[in-house]
Amino acid sequence: MTTTKTARELAETYFTAWEAGDFESLRGLLAEDVDFVGTLGTASGVEEALAGLKGLGQVLEKIDVKVRVAEGDEAITWFDLHTSVAPPTPTANWMQVRGGRIARIRVTFDPRGLLAGFESKG
């Protein structure tokens, strides 16, 4: 018997997989036509979305979730993004689920610390 995960469960699994660098699990959570819009860029489709997650994953150290709110097919996760190039970055991530997979993701944060960190690392 297959059970469909709730938006909250998908969000929890998404962040756990991303923090662990488990991109195959992430692939299984994302809709083929996932639409991502964030502070550092956009992605259309699962391959572009995974490329973006892998890129930031190279400096990702920890995701410290502060709160997650879910209602129906939507979940918002507020967390501190810990990286090797910047101080912890407070971040909001909204995702929408369709057909049991994550179909839309919107992310917002102040990018100045990360951009300065990438520039000095470069």
Image (spheres, rainbow, N blue to C red):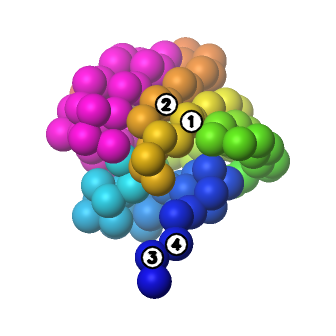
Q: Which residue position is annotated with label 4?
A: 3
Q: Is residue 19 magenta?
A: no
Quadrant showing the N terminus: bottom left
Gap in angstroms between the C-alphas marked 4 and 2 = 22 Å
Q: CA distance from mark 1 to mark 4?
A: 20 Å
Name which quarter of the figure residue 70 lies in: top right
In this rendering, which labeled residue sits more in front, label 4 or label 2?
Answer: 4
Is 80 placed left or right of 38 in the picture?
right
- Pick whichever of labels 3 and 1 is earlier in the sequence: 3
User: Gap between marks 3 and 1, in whole Å?
Assistant: 22 Å
Residue ranking furthest to the bottom: 1
Q: What is the x, y in percent for residue 106? A: 53, 25
Q: Secondary structure at mark 4?
A: loop
Q: Which residue is mark 3?
A: 2
Q: Nearer the viewer, residue 113 or 9?
A: 9
In the image, residue 50 lies at what x, y percent? 27, 43
Secondary structure of the residue carrying tag 3 is: loop
Q: How many marks?
A: 4
Q: Against 21, is 119 above or below?
A: above
Give, as a single range, the part of the protein colored magenta.
31-58
Which residue: 36% across, 17% down? 41
Q: Are marks 1 and 4 in contact (CB under 8 Å)?
A: no
Q: Are marks 2 and 1 in contact (CB under 8 Å)?
A: yes
Label 1, secondary structure: give it: strand
Asked if the residues shown at circle 3 and circle 2 are in contact, with their CB atoms under 8 angstroms apart, the answer is no
Badge 4 vs badge 3, beta-carbon distance below 8 Å: yes
| Residue 61 circle label | none
